[in-house]
Image (tube, rainbow, N blue to C red):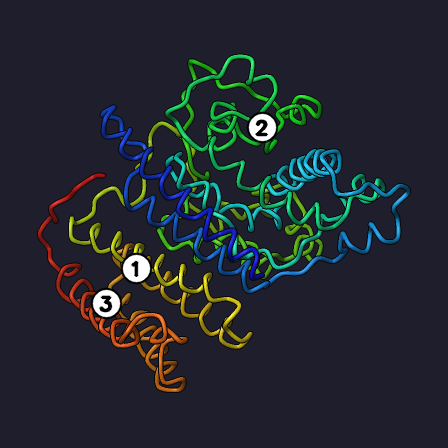
Amino acid sequence: MENYGKILLIAMPCFLLLIIIEKLYGYFKGVHYAPLMDSVSSISSGITNATKDILGISFSILSYEWMVSHMAVFHVQASVLAYCIAFIVIDFQGYWTHRWSHQINLFWNKHAIHHSSEEFNLSCALRQSVSSFVNLFTFLLLPAALLGVPATVISITLPLHFFLQFWYHTRYINKLGILEKIIVTPSHHRVHHAINPEYLDKNHSQIFIIWDKLFGTFQEELPDVPPVFGITRPAATWNPIKINFQHLGVLIRDAWHAEHFIDKLKIWFMPTGWRPEGFDEKYPLRKIDAVYDFQKYGTENPKALIGWSVAQLLITLLFITYFFDNIGALTFTELILYGIFVFVTVYSYTELMDKNQFAFVWEAIRFFYATSLIVIHGNWFGLDEQIPNGTYIVLGYLSLSFAVSLYFSFISFKKNLNPITLNV
């Protein structure tokens, strides 16, 4: 946990730097594929996912350690060969896990967040799940376990493999010649994120594109079919925590309404989007049919709201940095309490981004929760030992944030005049 926090402290600024470079390049080219509100939502999703991982709120039905200790035929030492085997096997596992997440109703819930952006840029790579609590697919690492690849090699290779999937989430890189035949490229992944009928459920590979070609799910990007991004049942919110459970909510409601017991069971394991007969008419859901003719969510925003949303994200990143840097100094209870603060923070300011007039309620909950922690502990998780009067700075920020939330909820959002907009 502590080591992963240190890795994130290195990875986060690298990701943010690349996101900023992409944004600046878009300005330079005069083509903007990374709207600020979309980027704030995406990075906020990454914050919640990283916090969940740090807290360890998930477990495996079958652990790799158990497989390698009970099933290994050979024993490969930690070497270049071991890391190569681990990387290939993890990529194989990633293909099938990814493919099943697209093809099975229950598993789509944990993956929909990643596709929820109606843009395609580096920041949307950070849209990762907090709704996955059980790892069912460790068995796909069996080839590495049989060869006796040490668990430490797998644990080191997994985050590396994950981070290498960041770079190809961009529209600014065209096809890459011979590399298109070997690795997943931006062109391949644009196809994967598209909702065009020609592109749906294609290109599930994560590093090596060979898996899609081998198992019949490859589709190249067509010059006359520009990809349109998002999900066919649009999220219609900037709140990443809501998005994480939207599909699950649909499944629960449909299972409740289903008249036949078999349908109550089938709905969880049928292909993604399946509903009992007649449900599309009885319980309609908004669905995008004309991919070139729909309004993207949240394209009109007051300048003040955009600026405040960016400020909230940057301040939250400071809180996260302090959290990850002090994992070893915090008790397990303190880690949980801090994690709750992070989740409530993201929920609060993304509700404000959605122009929810009741967003101030979540901000009030955050304010009283955080101040209660300060009263109980006497300071903000030891911050005063590193920054003089750090707790008072936190209290000042919380007070200002609450006041700004009240302003937007009771004044700005209730104005009938068309707001000044800035589509960036």
User: Residue, x 8% and y 52% (percent of image)?
Assistant: 417
Q: Which numbered disc, 1 or 3, marks the residue that appears first in the sequence?
A: 1
Looking at the rendered structure, the secondary structure element under dot 1 is: helix
Crowding at mark 3 (Cα within 10 Å: few <14, some 14-19, many 20+): many
Q: Which numbered disc, 1 or 2, marks the residue that appears first in the sequence?
A: 2
Mark 3 — residue? 401
Location of residue 177 with respect to 138 vertically, above or below: above
Looking at the rendered structure, the secondary structure element under dot 2 is: loop
Residue 392 at x, y = what percent?
A: 25, 76
Image position of 269 (left or right of 226): right
- Asked which quadrant contains residue 226, the reply is top left
Q: Which numbered disc, 3 or 2, marks the residue that appears first in the sequence?
A: 2
Mark 1 — residue? 315
Crowding at mark 2 (Cα within 10 Å: few <14, some 14-19, many 20+): many
Q: Amino acid at mark 1?
A: Ile
Q: In this view of the protein, which residue sits in the foreground, 241 or 182?
A: 182
User: Residue, x 55% and y 18% (percent of image)?
Assistant: 180
Q: Residue furthest left?
A: 417
Looking at the rendered structure, the secondary structure element under dot 3 is: helix
- Evaluate if marks 1 and 2 touch, with contact meaning CB atoms under 8 Å apart: no
Crowding at mark 1 (Cα within 10 Å: few <14, some 14-19, many 20+): few
Q: Amino acid at mark 2?
A: Asn
Mark 2 — residue? 203
Location of residue 183 with respect to 7 vertically, above or below: above
Q: Nearer the viewer, mark 1 or mark 3?
A: 1
